Image (cartoon, grey):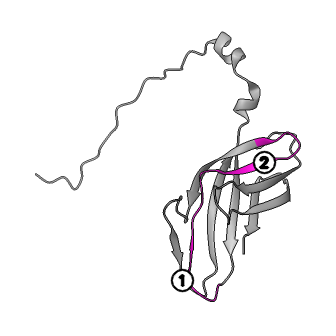
Amino acid sequence: MDCSNATITKPKEPDIKPLIDVDVLSSIDPQSLDESCVYVHCHCGRQQEEFLIRIWRTTYLIDPASMSKSQLLHAEKITFAPQWTLIPKGINYSFLLIFSGLPKDCKRFDLVEEIPQPGGFHIANIIRNDTDVYHANLF
């Protein structure tokens, strides 16, 4: 059978519009519709020796005015404790942390790794911007 001239047609889907329950729509908190994420690109400078790095799930963005904590939702190019990521010597290394949204009225916040041992990082007074995308130099 020669299929070189065959055409595939997709059946037309009916135009179905979902019903919207007005009572449910009016009960949704408008702030939850505006929820966005905060992206923090973390940078580690060149080190003389290879080193190990990891992030704890207890890393937050904290609004000092309200003490609200934005949760760490996702991390890229770094492992979560107890696992370690090996960084070769002489390499500039970056990774991404994605957090839940900050309060709308937040002007400054802290990036805090709350851990049960020494070595957690704390970057204070990060000035909020319109994009909620930030770059932090850890070391």
User: Looking at this view, is 35 or 75 the one in front?
Assistant: 75
Q: Position of residue 133 (x, y in %)?
A: 74, 57
Q: Which mark is residue 9?
A: none
Please, what is the three-letter code of the amino acid marked with disc 1? Answer: Pro
Mark sitting earlier along the chain (2/1): 2
Side of 23 relative to 123 (left or right): left
> Residue at (78%, 48%) from the top-left corner?
62
Q: Position of residue 1 (x, y in %)?
A: 10, 51
Does 83 appear above or below 32? below
Check disc 1 and report its element: helix, strand or loop: loop
Q: Which mark is residue 62?
A: 2
Please, what is the three-letter code of the amino acid marked with disc 2? Answer: Ile
> Residue at (78%, 53%) from the top-left corner?
131
Q: Specify the farthest residue to the front.
A: 117
Q: Position of residue 25 (x, y in %)?
A: 67, 17
Crowding at label 1, few (<14), some or many (≥20) Cα neighbours within 10 Å?
Answer: some
Q: Provide the residue designation for mark 1.
A: 88
Gap in Å between the C-alphas at discs 2 and 1?
Answer: 31 Å
- Would residue 52 be counted in the magenta stretch? yes
> Residue at (85%, 39%) from the top-left corner?
66
Side of 109 relative to 92 (left or right): right
Stretch of the chain drawn in magenta? 47-68
Side of 10 relative to 29 (left or right): left
Q: Position of residue 112 (x, y in %)?
A: 73, 56
